[in-house]
Amino acid sequence: MSADIAQSHSPSKYDRLIAAAKAMPPPPTVVVHPCDETSLRGAVDSAQAGIIRPILVGPEGKIRGVASKFGLDISGYALVDAAHSEDAAAKSVELIHAAKGEMLMKGSLHTDELMRAVTAKAGGLRTDRRISHVFVMDVPTYAETLFVTDAAINIFPDLDAKRDIIQNAIDLYTQAGFGKAPRVAILSAVETVTSKIPSTIEAAALCKMADRGQITGGVLDGPLAFDNAIDPEAARIKGIKSEVAGRAQILVVPDLEAGNMLAKNLAYFAKADGAGIVLGARVPVVLTSRADTPRARMASCAVASLYANARRQHAPTVAA
């Protein structure tokens, strides 16, 4: 996938994403407890588009009942019976351990229920990297495909957690084909470092960590206020000169509350779509919401599919 997905000025950034994913082999995707129309339709639509190859995990009777009621053909997909949502989450994680799937996709269970299984110390899908969330946002008025992180998993991340949050987002950006060396803005309320606002100190520290090679693959600047992160004129007025200011591609928020409010403001005021993906686990996890549009759901699958394909291609080979 070429970097023009990130650069397009049209409202078709997600269409380009979906087209790029369709050109790749559809990864086997464990769909956890798709027991309502929205979640099951999202999986079926993405499968019919050639983006994923679903393995449906949940109460077989419920899943077949939903499929029958809403006219969804699931006859071509594997179905693993599970007693209830908690059992479905556990069995889905087991399928990943058994190398049956390369992605997880949330169904109609609660996010915290799924993430408990993913993050469990025993039998979960943890890695050495902190697990974090990225919204991949198509903002019609912004030239770039915009990443917002972390707005769903880490409530008050410390400096080490933010290092992983940033690295996860950079890896997704580069490996899923959005482009090279993304411009990363570390947000705060102001663009100057002050002891009165701890997030400004952390932003400065994270930039120095990048200078020392502790964060790689992107260009960092911070602290930056939201306006001078995304608007060149606002950056110019404040006298900020950097590769990132005014043209950020990844926005790193101080904490989950700020990130969640930012993402929802973009969605409801700027009419942006937000595809959601969890990173840092053994496989990418597609997180969708009942409020997501069908296009955003498919875009979430597309991003995760592109990332899963890139990870497969770069996986180390084992000598015979």
Image: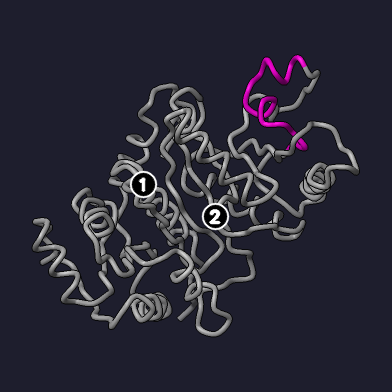
**Residue shown at 59%/47% (left/top)?**
149
Q: Amino acid at mark 2?
A: Ala
x, y (%) of residue 295?
31, 41
x, y (%) of residue 128?
64, 70
- Judged from the image, the secondary structure of the residue bearing numbered disc 1 is loop
> Between marks 2 and 1, how big is the CA–CA gap?
15 Å
Q: Earlier in the sequence, mark 2 or mark 1?
A: 2
| Residue 226 image-quadrant placement | top right
| Residue topped by disc 1 | 291
The quarter of the image holding the C terminus is bottom left
Q: Is residue 218 left or right of residue 28?
A: right
| Residue topped by disc 2 | 152
Q: Amino acid at mark 1?
A: Ala
Please name whichever residue, 204 or 100, is drawn nearer the observer in this view of the structure.
Answer: 204
x, y (%) of residue 109?
36, 67
- Judged from the image, the secondary structure of the residue bearing numbered disc 2 is loop
Residue range highlighted in magenta: 221-237
Q: Which mark identifies residue 110?
A: none
Q: Is residue 274 left or right of residue 100?
A: right
**Residue shown at 23%/77% (left/top)?**
59
**Vertical position of residue 237 compared to residue 120: above or below:** above
